[in-house]
Image: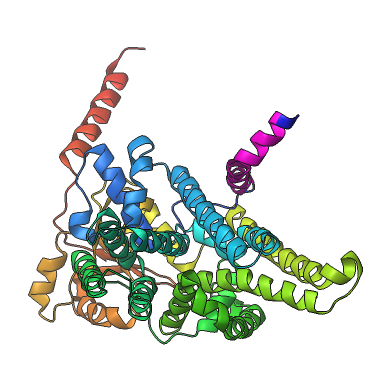
Amino acid sequence: MNQAKELLEKYWGYLALLIWIGAAVAFDLVRLTPFALDEEAAKGLLLTWTVSDNIVNPVVIFGLPDFRALLYAPIGTYWPGNLLAAKIMSLAIAFVAVTLLYRWARKNSDAETALIASILLLVSPALITQVDSLSAGPYILLGFALGVWLDNAYRKSDKYFGGWYFSQMLWVAILSTLHPIALAYPIVIAWNWYKRPHAVKSSRHMYIGLAIAITLSLLMRGGWHDFAIFQNPIEYLAIALQGAIVWSAADIQWWPGIIAAVLLVFVIISDFKNIAKDTLSQIIIACIALGVVMPDSNWAFIGVTFLIYRGTHHLIQFNNSRNKQGAVGQRGIVFVVALVVCSFFMLQDKNHVLTIKHALLAPEDELIQSVMAIAEDESKAFRIASQWPGRTMLATKRDVLPLPPALDDKDEMLKAIKSITHIVFDPYKPKNKALANAISNLGGETETLGLLKAGAIIKVRNHKVRLSTQQRIDQQDIKNNSEEVLDKPQ
């Protein structure tokens, strides 16, 4: 009995990980179809899968993906083309991030706060949608937590340019590829080296190293893509808490976003004393401040995470200040709030499951699904230029290219699109208006096959695309086998 108890205490974390991943897959909380994926994650999967299969690498035309491609390397080696393996990897990464946050909360608050907050985060729709879409939010949180550990380890080391220093610079470069809000990590690290300089080491080498790491990583990747600025942050908080796919602004439940925004501001103001002493809190708050300018689902997830952990701490402190006797008096408020929040989260998770079971798709995914229907006929040549090349290639399993340039000259534009059969994009997006005008000037050379809510599917009529040699050989084999069957006497 004692031995079993010792084993449980030693390995309870691994057991919880297996139970959480098993429940997420068994209850259909993650999709097994190539929809609702993050575009950069799709590019990373394509990179690892094509390397494993020894075929032409899409990095040449799609650009260098972020560091998630490195984490996908094991599943690319052992399970190429398996989307479930990628989802399980995302679940495992999210659980590791929650584990590090649990230890952080236990150190800064207490075990009760850490346990309640971690459980709420694991069942939150914000986390479920992040892992289902393979988004960058959990990876950013994991990067922040490990980055603090790397900085502390380097401060304790005796060498100026030892392994800890270069490990930290590499980690900064990796984080910088994920999202602009990940720059909160090098900014806070540089600020701390300025405010709390090392007794022996100069801070200048840290500033130079951080600047070089950020610059090189962004130059290699070509900067960040498709990040809108000056959006409504409350909208993204509401969507993160709602969890299920939101078709339009009319589908958003605004009240959770408004409540979360108010509470988040209150928690940050109340946390000023803790912020001055804790590096991870400084990084997360700097991340939230940067993300207000360019909010998206990743920013909202980090904001919800900070609200859950630090909000739980302040809620317990408030309950303790009332000095009520008995279990109900001492934890009554905490129990009621946790029950309400957990019930709301589970309700949104149920809506997420129903969305998956009934195959309800977001407008962009509906557009990609229509492209899949066109690509199913393998007897016809197909090479599409897409606004979402990674997601489109995963869905169609056919040749996909990025969007062609928008050229004013008609003949030059025709030359640019002769190597493709179709184009799928959102013509109403400001950055695509020039391309939409250029295509509309081609007249009868193109045909609009579909105009959906998320965009249009354009067919190039006089394209110069042929089936690949292998496809022609396969079709000839099928034809020959059919003729042999017909000629064979009955």
Q: Is residue 468 left or right of residue 85?
A: left
- Is residue 10 found inside the magenta-colored segment of the image? yes
- Is residue 45 found inside the magenta-colored segment of the image? no
Whether residue 378 is situated above or below residue 352 in the rendered picture: above
Q: Image quadrant of residue 351?
A: bottom right
* Main secondary-structure element of the magenta-colored stretch: helix
Q: Image quadrant of residue 114?
A: bottom right
Q: Which of 310 and 244 is in front in this view?
A: 310
Q: Which of 421 and 124 is in front in this view?
A: 124
Q: Which residue lies furthest to the right in this view?
A: 326
Residue 148 at x, y percent in the picture: 42, 64
Residue 197 at x, y percent in the picture: 33, 75
Q: In which quarter of the image is the C terminus?
A: top left
Residue 5 at x, y percent in the picture: 71, 35
Residue drawn at 43 percent across, 71 percent down: 452
Residue 117 at x, y percent in the picture: 65, 64
Whether residue 69 is situated above or below residue 240 in the rendered picture: above
Q: Nearer the viewer, residue 431 or 127?
A: 127
Q: What range is drawn magenta here?
A: 3-26
